[in-house]
């Protein structure tokens, strides 16, 4: 198990969210609204052809976030 930024995860990885940086607060709030909170599990499904954005499954939802947004999320790859 490896601790890394979500933006460094690979397609197919299952990740446990460990920490979300507090700044910028608007982004943190948006991620919380999407269900990305410390302790949540997510799966990296795929990347767009140029690598950005990335598609994730969080619970029963499918979401896309930019790699710049994924940089503020620390995860442990399972």
Image (tube, rainbow, N blue to C red):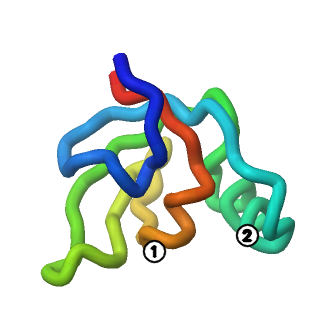
Which residue is rendered at x = 26% and y = 38% of the image? Answer: 13
Taking the spot 81% from the left edge, 63% from the top edge, the residue there is 23
Which numbered tag is attached to residue 74? none
- How far is the residue under mark 1 from the one under mark 2? 11 Å
Q: Position of residue 65 (x, y in %)?
A: 47, 70
Q: Secondary structure at mark 2?
A: helix
56 or 2, which is in the foreground?
Answer: 2
Q: Position of residue 15 (x, y in %)?
A: 41, 34
**Residue 34 in the image, given as x and y percentages of width and height:** 63, 60
* Precedes in sequence: disc 1 or disc 2: 2
Is any atom of residue 58 visible in this view?
A: yes
- Name the residue located 36 percent from the left edge and 29 percent from the top edge: 77
Residue named by callout 2? 27
Does residue 19 lie above or below 26 as drawn? above
Q: Relative to residue 69, is residue 54 drawn left or right?
A: left
Pointer 1 residue: 66
């Amino acid at each position: 198990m490896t601790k890394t930024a979500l933006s460094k995860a690979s397609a197919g990885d299952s990740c446990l969210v460990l920490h979300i940086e507090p700044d910028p607060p608007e982004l943190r709030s948006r991620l919380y609204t999407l269900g990305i909170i410390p302790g949540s599990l997510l799966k990296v499904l795929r990347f767009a052809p140029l690598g950005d954005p990335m598609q994730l499954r969080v619970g029963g939802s499918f979401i896309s976030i930019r790699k710049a947004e994924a940089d503020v999320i620390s995860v442990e790859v399972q």
